[in-house]
Image: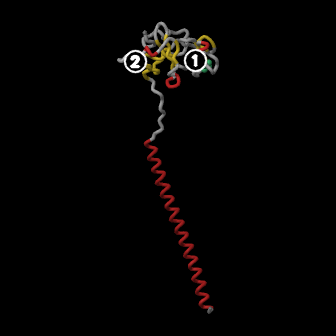
Amino acid sequence: MSEDKLETTTEDTVSEDLKARKEKKLIWRRNFAWTCIWGFLGANVLMSLRFFFPRILFEPKTKFRIGYPSDFGFGVDTRFQAEHRIWVVRNTRGIFVIFAKCTHLGCTPDWVESENKFKCPCHGSGYDTEGINFEGPAPRPMDRARVELDAEGQIVVDTSTLYQCPPGAPCRFGEDGSFITV
Ligand code: FES
C-alpha cells in the first residue's frame, strides 16, 4: 500500500470516529432533553391529580342511629365503642349513652364485666355502670351524649352534644336529651 493511500485511510478512520462520537453526544443530549421534558410533564400530571385528592381527614359521624330501644337489654352495651366511642346503658329508668372518654386526661376506659365497672388503663380511674367516678384521679363522671328517638322510633345519638356532671356545678344528667325513657 502506498504512503498516500495509507494516510487517506487513517484520516477516514479518524473522521469516522469523530462522526460516531458526535452522533453519540447528540443522541445523549436528545435523550437527556426528552427525559427532562417527560419528567416535567409527569410532575405536572401528578400535581394535577393531587388537586383531585385533597388532604381531608375523614372523622366518624357525630350523629348516628344505633337501633330501637328494644335492641338493648339491661346493662352496658359495648357494641359501638370501636366505631363511635360510646357505651349504651339501659337501667330501670331508661337508656342513656356514655361518651367513652376518661375525665382525667381523656383515655378510653375499658368495660370490665367481671368487676361491673369501667376501668381506665392510663391512671386507674374507676367508674360504675352509670359512668360515675368512684376511684382514681378522675374529677367527675364520664359525659353523656345526646339521645332522642327519630320518627321511626330508632335511637339517634349525637356526640357533638355532651351532658356533664361536674362536682360543685349543676348536674345535667337529668336534662331532656341526656336519656330516653322506655
Ligand atoms: S386518663 Fe383515665 S385515669 Fe388518667
What amino acid is labelled 1 in the image? Answer: Trp
Quadrant where the C terminus sits is top left
- Assign a secondary structure to mark 1: strand
- Distance between the alpha carbons at the discs numbered 1 and 2: 25 Å
- The picture places residue 102, in percent across and down from the top left corner, at 57, 19
Q: How is the image coloured?
A: secondary structure
The earlier-in-sequence mark between 1 and 2 is 1
- The picture places residue 163, in percent across and down from the top left corner, at 48, 15
What amino acid is labelled 2 in the image? Answer: Gln
Residue at 61% x, 84% y is 10
Quadrant where the N terminus sits is bottom right
- Assign a secondary structure to mark 2: loop
Q: Exactly how many numbered labels are in the figure? A: 2
Q: Is residue 92 left or right of residue 17?
A: left
Asked which quadrant contains residue 7, the reply is bottom right
- The picture places residue 83, in percent across and down from the top left corner, at 50, 25
Asked which quadrant contains residue 3, the reply is bottom right
Residue at 39% x, 16% y is 149
- The residue to which callout 2 is attached is 154
- The residue to which callout 1 is attached is 111
Image vertical order of residue 28 relative to residue 161, above or below: below
Q: Which corner quadrant of the figure contains ligand 1? A: top right
Residue pushed farthest top? 92
